[in-house]
Amino acid sequence: MNPKLALAGAGEVSGAIDPLQSWWMPFTHNRRFKAQPRLIESAAGAYYTLAGNQRVFDCLSGMWCTPLGHAHPGIVRAVSDQVQRLDYSPGFQLGHQPAFELAARIAALAGRPADRVFFVNSGSEAVDTALKIAIGYHRVRGEATRTRVIGRERGYHGVGLGGLSVGGIGVNRKMFAPMMMPGVDHLPHTYSPQHMRFSRGQPLWGAHLAEDLERLVALHDASTIAAVIVEPVQGSTGVIVPPRGYLERLREICSKHGILLIFDEVITGFGRLGKPFAAQYFGVQPDLTTFAKAVTNGVVPMGGVVARGEIYDAFMNGPEHVIEFFHGYTYSGHPLAVAAAHASLDAMIDQRLIERAAELAGVLEDAVHTLRDEPHVADIRNLGLAAAVELEPLAGQPGARGQRVFARGLDEGILLRVSGDIIALAPPFISTEDEVRAMIESLRRTLRAIAAD
């Protein structure tokens, strides 16, 4: 027992604390994990090293957040230098120059240098911030009746109360129903296995589903709706790719009725589709964009909201001595996060890693679709450097087959991310073509082994 683990008043150091039991782990089967823990000891490049010196390939870039690989030397150096120079800086009524420069870089990378960036610390905070901005925007413009937000079924927008309210994953919502935001409605999701199983890229069927927004406008009246929020590609629910023309139609309907369109790009932002943002990939410009994860390569938590300049300007019309937007966090624009983000953007640009992601997208597509005839594979879909393999669930045990694949995958040298019975794949941008193909072959062996058990 490490003597530093002993708590004051806890008695003898020996046996005072079982640290494995102390951490209530997030989104984890705590009892199952603690019965047979699998611990990570280190990471470098595209690989983790588990306890026992077992090396596994990082199939989902951490949790969509480490596309540049682990222990990137430029980021390590930047954060180390920063902590010695300025470890913390308050963001209220004071600022530090690199944070302003980072905001300008992100807006320019998104292709709209006149936009403004509000920094937060996670994707969940980014979503709740975007919802506040949207509702506040209409209020300062004299349209205070616009308080309703439209989300989408199967959408994931983090675990803040705002994000849960607009999100559409039932198991995330049901325990917290009494706390949900009022006045939220949901569009239908766009996944139809009957029409789009084994699609490569965007499905041809489904653009008409955007028309359901017109139904919600007629039901609630446009004067009550502040915003629509969607993930351009729905990630956490299993890489659901939007049908061709769907996002374009959402944009048209929102513009027609004066509704703000929010893209949640926490997963797709910073290169996952081979463009800086999904908005550029699809050619559809939202009014607000959330980001997090890859902006710092996962090294220091950070997120943010990119807002059209006109939205920011609308808040700036009051008296100068009054704070325009009563919102923010102690760690907004944290110096270490800012340093990590600058270094991450430098690496993406200097090493042309976003272009690299675009090049690897075709390799992943060709490789992953070779799994079509493997045991229990119900669907495969992909876009950019992301894909999903959906498995047939065990009878009466949804999610059980996915958990078996996860555990067996570790034995095969791959760290997978499963959502129920869906396996998500999003390898680091630094991966080689051989590593991407080897990942799929390891998954093939895993599926066959599970089928044989």
Image (cartoon, grey):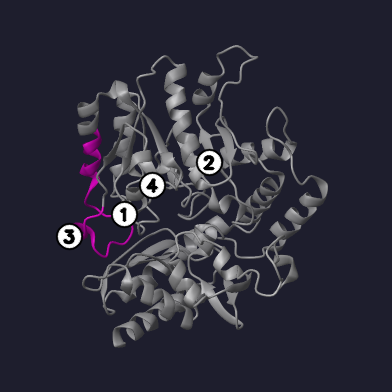
Mark 4 residue type: Pro
Q: Name the residue under label 2.
A: 110
Residue at point 48%, 63% (across, down): 359
**Comparing labels 1 and 4, the label whose residue is closer to the camera:** 4
The residues bearing labels 2 and 3 have C-alpha atoms spaced at a distance of 35 Å
Q: Is mark 1 on a helix, strand or loop?
A: loop
Mark 1 residue type: Gln
> Which residues are drawn in magenta?
191-213
Q: Is mark 3 on a helix, strand or loop?
A: helix
The residues bearing labels 1 and 2 have C-alpha atoms spaced at a distance of 22 Å
Mark 3 residue type: Gln
Image quarter hosting the C terminus? bottom left
Mark 2 residue type: Ala
Q: What element carries label 4?
A: loop
Of callouts 3 and 4, which one flags the residue occurring earlier in the amino acid sequence? 3
Does the segment drawn in magenta span residue 208? yes
Image quarter hosting the N terminus? bottom right
Q: Name the residue under label 1.
A: 202
Q: Horizontal placement of 205 versus 83: left or right? A: left
